[in-house]
Structure formats: C-alpha cells, structure tokens
Image: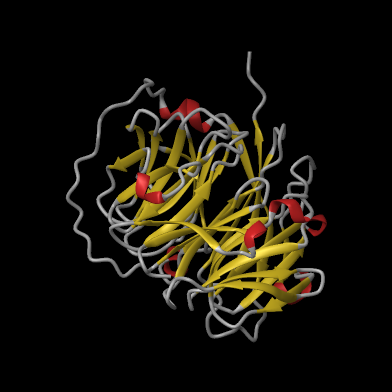
Amino acid sequence: MNINSRISNSNNDSNQEDEEETAEDRARCEWDFHLATIISPSTTREVSDVIGAIEFDPTGHLLATGGISRKIRIYALSSLPSPHGCNLTTSFSDHSTACKFYICTPAKLSSLRWQPDSGGRIIGSGDYDGVVTEYDVERRVAIFERDEHDGRRVWSIDYSINGELCASGSDDGTAHIWDRRCNGGSVWAAKAGGAVCGVEFDPGGGPWIGVGSADRHAYVYDIRATAAAAGPVAVLGGHGRAVTYVRFATAGGGGRVVTSGTDGTHRLWSWEEGREVRVFRGHVNKRSFVGLSVWREGGLVGSGSESGEVFVYDLRWGEPVWVSRWAGDRADADRGFVSAVSWRQTPGEREGMLVAGGSDGVLKAFVSKRKEARL
C-alpha cells in the first residue's frame, strides 16, 4: 500500500539521547528467535493478496488478517505454536487449511482492530472507501458502519481499552473519535496538515491518543478536552517524510511513543517532554506501509521492510537486534516487501510471538525467548 505524499526529506536527525547505547553485540545476545510457522497462498494464488493488517484478539485465542484480498481471515491461535514449546521445527500450511474462516468485505482493507470488551466477537476495519465497519465474527456479518471521511481512504483505526471509543484516521486529513454509547456518532475530530496515517489510544487506559500524519509530524492529544480545537499536548517533529504509525511504548504512563516514517526510520520519543530519545535505523521504508508493533512486555519493536526482511529493535539500542529475510534468496526478496507485523500482547509474558505478513500474501509466525544469563 503506497503513500502518495510528495514530501521532501529535509530534516536533520536529533542526536539527543537520554541513555548511553551499549555495544551492539550485547543487544544481539539477549533473544533467540525461531520461525515456527509459514502460511502461504494456495497454488491458485489470487492476483493480489497483500497483507496490510494483522491483529491478535484480546482473549489470546484468535488472529485476524486483512488487506487487498477483501477478506478478513480468522485463525485459531491454537493452530499456531506456543512460545513455551521446545519444538524448533517449522510447520508449513496454506491459507485454505490454516484459516478457520473468513469474512468477505466490500472494499480493500487497510486496518483492523478487535473491540476490547467483546470477548473476541467484534472486529473493526478501516477500508479504502473511507468506511469504518464493525463485524460480528461469530455471525460473520457487518453490524455497524461509520462514514464521515467523505469517501477518502481510512488508513488506521483503534479502540480505547474499554471499547467505548473508536478512532479513525483518513486521507481526508482528519482523525475522528466515535463514541459507541452515542449511536456511534463522531464526538471529536482533529485536522492535520496532511493525511492521517496512524492513530492509537494509550493501551493503559490513559486519556491520550497518538496521531501520525503525512505532514511529517506525530501528535498526542488529551481526549478529555471537549474539542480537538484545544490542540495537541505534544507535537513531535523529526521525521523527514510521512509518519505512518504511532505506537505507545509504555501503557498507562511513562510518556513514551514509537513512531515510524517513510524516511526509513522509527523514532522513540518522550512525548511529555517533546523530546526525541532514539532513532532506529536498518530497515528500508520509502513509500509503503511496512508495519510497526511494540511488544511492551519485552521492550521490543517489530518492523517490516521494503527490503523483504523482518526487523526487531530493542528500545534501548538504535541498531536492529535481529533480522530475518522473508524470501529464500535476494532475487525473490526484491519482488516484494514485508507489509504488516504484530506482537502478541500478554501481560506478564516472558516469551513472545511476532506474526508478520508480506506483499506476497505469506504469513509467518516467529517465537522469541530471552536467553539465559551467562555467569
């Protein structure tokens, strides 16, 4: 999915950091990663099956994907490996076998989010026609639609932790917040200087929402304000091109977010101070959405790349701690890119699961374990 934004890359990277970086080899020694599952399109492959969104449901039982194919595919996590297992083999399957079921959608999908208080029953989607739709997964039908973006593509949606509020960001340059208790009407809207590419509520339940825009800035708003006209509480400027994702690195306080831009960097911010803490470099991102996910329990950042690789960064270091090539050889990798990533978020979990999707329609699950400390 390309971002049609003609924004010149003219910013100078901030050198300000609040922590001294440790040697790169130390960072690389802390985690073991294993490719556990590969799920591929069938041999009668669809013309285009770019995976644009991957989401774990809050119950920890389901995984959903969406993208160009106009389908929401639902997978049972019981069919994927547990990070607690000792099996280091890789299983292979295709979507027709691994997918529990799918829901057909009227338009291409750019974003998915499970409604937190639905017990894995309701999932929301943002599509290329500018519509936010909620689906009942058990009945496999649409149950609600919101259309206030004038038919312009919705790039991102998110729910507040209690599920009462839903946010959407669109090509029309606005971010909306919808209140599900008020017949789904829009109760808040903010205007950015370009397309709104990413939105996320504070996952800890704080009164904050992060917004990423094609105007090269990320913003944090206090949603307790009666109107977005009150302005953001933080403006984060440092990216040289469109900001595609905003992810909270800490939940319920801590004041840190990670942003991603098509200048080929992710950036860690102390947003309460309006200060850039660290720049993450290594992946390639010039024109597409490649995915960004923060595993808050493990302090790791997952990222796709236009180089056809999956990257993992540690929040403490600017260099990647792990890289995995998507295809078997460089020629194959040059024909596609990694377009979506998602960490499984389980409180107290010491082992992780990272699922990534590609522009080739392939889905891969990686498990990660922290290495035992050496005396």
Q: Is residue 95 above or below residue 195?
A: below
192 left or right of 222 in image: left
Looking at the picture, how far across and down is residue 279, in whole percent? 34, 38
Depth check: give the residue in front, 181 or 329.
Answer: 181
Direction top: furthest residue: 375
Quarter-wise, where is residue 66 in the image? bottom right
One can see residue 25 in this view = yes
- Looking at the rendered image, the quarter that the C terminus falls into is top right
Depth check: give the residue in front, 310 or 207.
Answer: 207
Depth check: give the residue in front, 280 or 251.
Answer: 251
Q: Is residue 107 above or below residue 340?
A: below
Name the residue rendered at 61%, 73% in the picture: 145
Looking at the picture, how far across and down is residue 295, in whole percent? 59, 40
Query: How many marks do you count on the picture?
Result: 0
Looking at the picture, how far across and down is residue 296, in whole percent? 58, 36
Name the residue rendered at 61%, 37% in the picture: 204
249 left or right of 122 in image: left
Name the residue rendered at 71%, 56% in the picture: 90
Q: How has the structure been colored for display?
A: secondary structure
70 left or right of 212 in image: right
Depth check: give the residue in front, 286 or 57.
Answer: 57
One can see residue 305 in this view = no
- Looking at the rendered image, the quarter that the N terminus falls into is bottom left
151 left or right of 89 in image: left
Quarter-wise, where is residue 281 in the image? top left
Looking at the picture, how far across and down is residue 362, in whole percent? 60, 68
